Amino acid sequence: MSTPSIPSIPITTGVMTGYVCPAPVVPAKEVKKVRPEQAKRTFHQIAQVRESQGMSIQNCARKLGIPLQEAREQEKPTSDLTISQLIAWKEVLDVPLSELVGPFEDELQNPIRNRAKLLKVMKSAKYIHQHTRESRIRTMAENQIDQILEIVPEFETVSPWPEVGQSHEARQPGVAVSRRFDPEIERRLDP
């Protein structure tokens, strides 16, 4: 009869570098509250990576399937997230986990910044490739995609920019303003 294995994490700081200790079991939706002595400890750089990619917190919250306030709380560098939560953020931001929890500095490191820029170029190239009908432009986009994949092979699965709608000025109303409610809902809203 075998004994159940306990998940473990390597200790990489302090005197016991290299030894392994049992990983704490935390419910998937829970964000640990940071003790005062850990208040300045940085656990991840989700906000920096998200901002460098130009992705809004609202869009991330929607993709994560969590309320906006919870996404804001989770992206704070001092939020001690579970592995499941970090993996969800990794998938939404389309970056390796190491970029979210890698070495920290006050500013985003150059390799991470450069990777975020390459990711934007890849998304643009894939969008152009997908939506153009001109063979010359399509060929240029294919070449650009191939060149990027030579540098970052894991970008093979990156998707093109989404077709959400046209952007508008901050003071212009979006398309949603022109849409009509279902007559039944509209009737309920009128006093």
Image (spheres, rainbow, N blue to C red):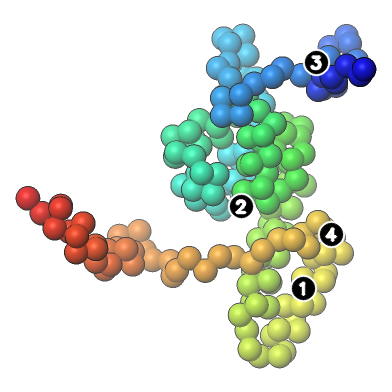
Farthest front residue in view? 1
Image spot of residue 8 (x, y percent): 82, 21
Q: Which residue is mark 1?
A: 144
Mark 4 crowdedness (10 Å alpha carbons): few <14, some 14-19, many ≥20: few
In the image, is residue 44 above or below residue 111? above
Q: Which residue is mark 4?
A: 153
Q: Which residue is mark 3?
A: 22
N-term mark: 3 or 1 = 3
In the image, is residue 126 above or below residue 186? below
Q: Residue type at mark 2: give it.
A: Gln
Cα–Cα span, label 2 and label 3 = 35 Å
Mark 3 crowdedness (10 Å alpha carbons): few <14, some 14-19, many ≥20: few
Residue visible at 68% across and 71% down? 126
Residue visible at 72% across and 17% down? 24
Q: Residue type at mark 3: give it.
A: Pro
Q: Relative to the observer, which residue lies in front, 9 or 6?
A: 6
Q: Which residue is mark 2?
A: 53
User: Is disc 1 placed on a helix, strand or loop?
Assistant: helix
> Does the rendering let one see residue 78?
no
In the image, is residue 95 above or below residue 168? above
Q: Viewed as shown, does residue 183 lie left or right of 172?
A: left
Q: Residue type at mark 1: give it.
A: Gln
Cα–Cα span, label 3 and label 1 = 46 Å
User: Is disc 4 placed on a helix, strand or loop?
Assistant: helix
User: From the viewer's perspective, is the residue at label 3 or at label 4 nearer?
Assistant: 3
User: Is disc 2 placed on a helix, strand or loop?
Assistant: loop
Residue visible at 87% across and 64% down? 150
Image spot of residue 184 (x, y percent): 19, 60
Image spot of residue 96 (x, y percent): 75, 45
